[in-house]
Amino acid sequence: MLSRLLIMGMILSTAVLTASAQTVKLLWPSGAPGALGNTEVDRPTIAIYLPDASKATGAGVVVYPGGGYEHLATEKEGTKPAEWLNQLGVAAFVVKYRLGPHYHYPAEFEDGIRAMRYVRYNAKDYGISPDEIGVWGFSAGGHMASSVGTHFDSGNPQASDPIDRVSSRPDFMILAYPVITLTGPYAHEGSMQNFLGPNPAPGLAEKFSNQLQVTPKTPPTFLFCTDADTTVPAENSIMFFDALRRNHVPGELHVFERGPHGTGLAQTYPELSIWPKLLEDWLRLRGLAK
């Protein structure tokens, strides 16, 4: 009986309801840096999902769907997480960033970090606090999120674009079965090639192996993965969590025994369906969710 009640609670807590109305904005209205054209693939965007005002906590999350830096799993790893966050009173901002093979570094990273600055700059308009904005990435989107969370800066006060004057540092990170390393046996080859390109500069793979970039200033992080994931091995998450511990950064890691790669919120995977509830508890513990 207790097990049934727990399962019912998990289903209710992860239920995705109808999203609030969304607006899609260009990250660079005048054109993204290094754009190769002016088609859909050349124009990174951000889709804005705001919770009901009566439930809003003042927190926001920038969401990066995965897809190996080649495509975006926007519904499963973007829209649904955004709707889920809205039910907790958290605003969500789903990023459509540029992808390989058309684009390689630095384009994807520029889009990822621009999205963080964009949300912080416009925080007042979205009813959120500029110091309660996190990032959430899945798979290669987890690499994007962890890149934003380890390669941030305080902004350029001399920039002509006011968005570039604000900090790009997230206040927290959520990494779901993330690509973390771009070197060694645990690297995801497709993500590495699409992100870096065929002839990366020396040292670039190490620079964006983000377990090597953790410092005491890295934001608190929640990580979820499975031991059975053969696409992006759990060692990616474990190495990042270990780096957090060594730098005394608050972190929480959940490695489930079973489950494939790319499960999203795992509503159809009974063995994993508790993971959003664990995340919900973590957000509540930090005062970010209702």
Image: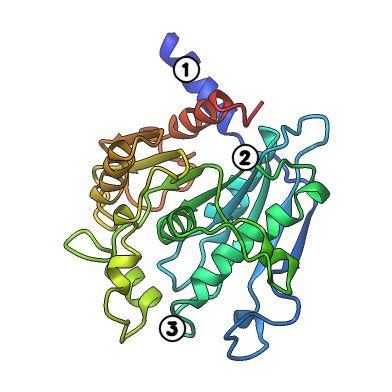
> Residue 38 versus residue 160: which sits nearer the camera?
160
Q: Secondary structure at mark 1?
A: helix
Q: Is residue 75 left or right of residue 205?
A: right
Question: How did the renderer colour the structure?
Answer: rainbow
Q: Where does the image place residue 11, in percent across and percent down from the top left?
A: 54, 28
Q: Compared to 184, does 274 lie above or below?
A: above
In this orientation, which residue lies closer to the viewer: 280 or 84? 280
Specify which label sits upstream in the sequence, 1 or 2: 1
Measured as percent of width and height from the top left, residue 157 is found at 67, 64
- Mark-to-mark CA distance, 1 and 3: 45 Å
1 vs 3, front mark: 3
Q: Residue at (50%, 58%) from the top-left corner? A: 152
Q: Secondary structure at mark 2?
A: helix
Cα distance in 3D space between marks 1 and 2: 19 Å
Q: Which residue is mark 3?
A: 101
**In the rendered image of this protein, does residue 122 appear above or below residue 157?**
above
Work out which quarter of the rendered image holds the N terminus and state it: top left
Which residue bears the numbered disc 2? 84
Q: Earlier in the sequence, mark 1 or mark 3?
A: 1
Please name the amino acid that badge 2 sits on: Trp
Label 3: element kind: loop
Task: Give the left or right position of residue 182, taking residue 221 as reference.
Answer: left
Q: Left or right of 122: which side holds 286?
A: left
Relative to 246, 92 lies left or right: right
- At a point 75% along the width and 40% down the height, the residue shown is 51
